[in-house]
Amino acid sequence: MKQPDEPCAPAGEAPDRRRPVRSFVLRQGRLTVAQERAFVDLWPRYGVDWVPGTLLDLAALFGNERAVVLEIGFGNGDSLAAMAAAEPLRNWLGVEVHAPGVGHLLLETERRGLTNLRVVRHDAVELLAGGLPPASLARVQLFFPDPWPKQRHHKRRILTPAFLDLLARALVPGGVFHAATDWEPYATQMLEVLEAQGSPFVNTAGPDRFAPRPATRPLTRFEQRGERLGHQVRDLVWRRR
Ligand SMILES: C[S@@+](CC[C@H](N)C(=O)[O-])C[C@H]1O[C@@H](n2cnc3c(N)ncnc32)[C@H](O)[C@@H]1O
């Protein structure tokens, strides 16, 4: 997992101006033998081969019309799998770019015998922009997004007004966006973006306030690291107007 102070591009590499600024840098993570097997044996069952330019049919994907929760950047996916197991009457869709994390979640999905979880390996911003029908999600989760702490990397932070518009389009009216971070300046920026004039979201905790940690959110791997470093964890729970 990328650490907060990791550089966003290899030293000396000139930025490619034609490419959009992304919220991640793909690292060549090594797959374990089990994860490699998971991509062969389990991907056909739990993986989603989303083709950019097409819309996902979520009811067909899950085989039912139940409410769908999207988790963006699930890391190794342990907390997502735990939530999917705890709420079997919802459908859970995870999107992550880091192959070892995806492989880990495929294995965990099989180990737990989950039938309500599917995985997309792609840039979540592109999936939100072009792959999900309007008003198709009941909830979106963004737990411990890369904080990009250096000023020159702030442009890589995923939570921007444009990202919020994409979320608002994909969520049903009344749907929930739940974010958590252990990076205080990012938490403050999240509040600012979410409360900007014309924001499509209402803060469930009241203006300018963080939410109490929902009991349903398991401790994530990155959160444990933040706690070891003594970071304060902030939850933000917002409702789409
Ligand atoms: C700091 S880690 C947190 C992982 C996990 N949520 C946790 O709390 O342990 C952020 C994760 O988001 C993923 N990520 C960042 N930008 C993404 C994007 N645009 N689409 C999909 N995944 C993304 C990264 O690959 C990384 O695994």
Image (cartoon, rainbow, N blue to C red):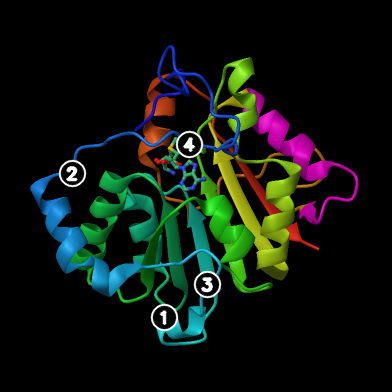
Q: Residue at x 41, y 87 (%)?
A: 63
SS at circle 2: loop
Mark 3, Cα crowd under 10 Å, few <14 / some 14-19 / many 20+, is: many
Residue 200, quarter of the rendered image: bottom right
Residue highlighted by disc 3: 68
Residue type at tag 4: Phe
- Residue 70 seen by the camera: yes
Residue 206, how many percent across, how many down? Answer: 80, 47
Mark 1, Cα crowd under 10 Å, few <14 / some 14-19 / many 20+, is: some
Residue type at tag 3: Val
Q: Does the CB distance between marks 3 and 2 fall below 8 Å?
A: no
Label 4, ligand 1: CB separation under 8 Å: yes
Residue highlighted by disc 4: 24
Residue 96, how many percent across, how many down? Answer: 41, 50
27 or 214: which is nearer to us?
27
Give the magenta range: 185-202
Mark 4, Cα crowd under 10 Å, few <14 / some 14-19 / many 20+, is: some
Left or right: 138 in relation to 74: right
**Quadrant placement of the C terminus:** bottom right
**Quadrant placement of the N terminus:** top left
Label 2 and label 1: CA atoms lie apart by 27 Å
Residue highlighted by disc 1: 62
